[in-house]
Image (spheres, grey):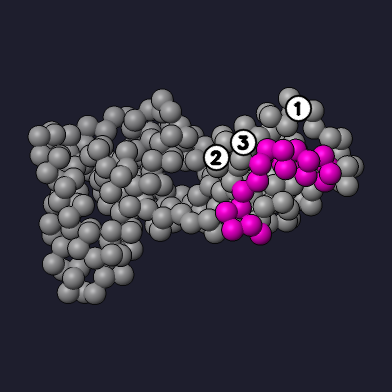
Amino acid sequence: MASASISRPDLVAVAVHRIRPALRSSLPAGDWLIIERELDSAAATLSDERRTAEHPAAALTVVRLMSTAETGRKLLAGRLAAQDAIVARVPGADRAALLGALAVVDLDASPATAADRGITLAPGGVGGGTSLKLRNFRVDFAALLKLGAASVTALQAVLAGPNPLVITAGVLTIAQALADTMTAPIGEDEASLFWSFAQTAADRDEKSATEDELRAACDRHRPEFGLEPLTPVQFTRALRKLEALSSIRPHGEGCWQLRETYRVA
């Protein structure tokens, strides 16, 4: 289970906390009873910073128990992958605030597919667009009311504290930032290039096109929507921006491949 989060006990504990209800409802009652006590015990160990020596074994226990059923394996893998994406979006964030935000955020539990991500744009890319990276992002405000902020000397207090604690600005700020960054804005140059790419390669088996094809298509399509052709510098910049957004990727020398579907708004 390749994930940066799996090496961080606090992130594994948060993941188990958020996917536990879904796991319980998806497993047969007998299967859940078999793993419930051991899973909760491992999660409690991971959330207790005084038991760091036990964290590696507890993380392995979580993986073992979640992998006894395909449903559990997918839930954990999807959640950890989503957390990796979120942690990467807020580098340098306060640890307590980040954990607090993750503890109240629901994300789609299944690994992303091409259909789960996509770009929304107007015909021709006029006016730019947005690129959806994670779906079913939801902040659980009832859980947010239980968050306390100061330090996470006991992550258990964040995950299961029975009394409402003070909501910190840091947690709310990160939760809002995460909600805002689930969609990334795309400028008009990038949107029009992506539009031209889609018109050229969307029906091809590998959904790929050469840079020369893309430049020719972009020069052909932009004037149809009242846009000036891109200069070489603008074209290269738009191409790199789409690559940075993970909307396209290199596909051999001088060739690119679509990574996202698109929807015309």
Highlighted range, magenta: 203-222
Instruction: Please name the amino acid that badge 3 sits on.
Output: Gly
| Residue depth check, mark 2 versus mark 1: number of the one nearer the observer | 2
Q: Is residue 189 left or right of residue 53?
A: right
Q: Residues within 10 Å of mark 1 (few under 14, many from 20)?
A: few
Q: Position of residue 157 (x, y in %)?
A: 25, 42
CA distance separating discs 2 and 1: 21 Å
Magenta stretch, main secondary structure class: helix
Secondary structure at numbered mark 3: loop
Residue 68 badge: none
Q: Are marks 3 and 2 in contact (CB under 8 Å)?
A: yes
Residue 254 badge: 3
Q: Earlier in the sequence, mark 2 or mark 1?
A: 1
Q: Position of residue 185 (x, y in %)?
A: 65, 39
Residue 232 badge: 1
CA distance separating discs 3 and 2: 6 Å
| Residue depth check, mark 3 versus mark 1: number of the one nearer the observer | 3
